[in-house]
Amino acid sequence: MKFHWILFGLLGWLLIGCVNTDNQSQMKSTKKTSKSFLADEYGKQVYFLHHRLLPEAIFQSEGRFFADMVSGNRERFNDIVSEYVSQQYADNIVYSVVDDGRGLLLEFPTPTHMPNCYFALVLKRDDTFSYFTFERSFEVAENNGFFGVLGGWQGESHFNLGPRMYQDAFEFVKELTASTIDDEKTKYEVMAVTK
């Protein structure tokens, strides 16, 4: 039980790091319609999958996770998602190999809680991996697309890359395959390092 309270506190700390606090005027003009992931156990399980299990699998498997997923060997991952979240959730994740085999896009079921993810992208450059998420945030009444926060990981570091309004996963992939966080030509302004 003590572990759950520690995990709960850590997840709360991570959430605070992902929320864009630099753009207060934009946040004031939005209407808060998204439920926090703290609302129920399901939201916490999905959050843990996106923000802890996937980064650990990507950065601690020495490339095995990426190789398995890109080659279509996804049964083990699906079993973990089914056990930890639900079979329905696992069955509704859409996988696409992108960027000439150097990227894996995961399209998740539409999140009902913030900051759970719409999409995630794993990119491989040489022997280095990057992991990006597009997380549900506030909804803008006039917007027909998604309004969320772009997050990124490299190794143990988690970055808040600020708000985005993507219409679909294609826009997410297009922006991220153009460069990565540590490229000299990077177009990302890191808004906060949360770890």
Image (cartoon, rainbow, N blue to C red):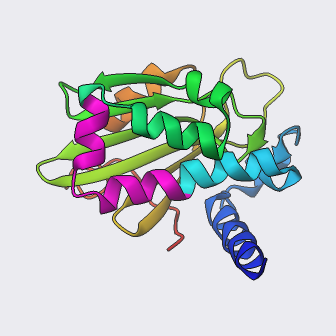
**Residue 162 can be seen in this image:** no
| In this rendering, position of residue 40 left or right of residue 188 | right
Q: Is residue 102 left or right of residue 143?
A: left
- In the displayed structure, 167 sits above or below 55; it is above
Main SS of the magenta part reads helix
In the orientation shown, which residue stands out farthest toward the bottom?
2
Looking at the image, residue 138 lies above or below residue 165: below
- Image: magenta residue range: 52-70
* Picture layout, residue 111 above or below residue 100: below
- Above or below for 156 versus 47: below
Name the residue: 40% across, 30% down.
105
Q: Which residue is drawn at 33% across and 32% down?
A: 104
Foreground pick, 70 / 136:
70
Camera-nearest residue between 90 and 144: 90
Identified at 22% across, 58% down, the residue is: 62
Q: Position of residue 81 (x, y in %)?
A: 56, 40
For this view, does 116 lie left or right of residue 120? right
* Residue 132 picture location, percent across and down: 43, 46
Is 81 one of the magenta-colored residues? no
Q: In which quarter of the image is residue 74?
A: top left
Question: Which residue occupies the foreground of this view, 79 or 6?
Answer: 79
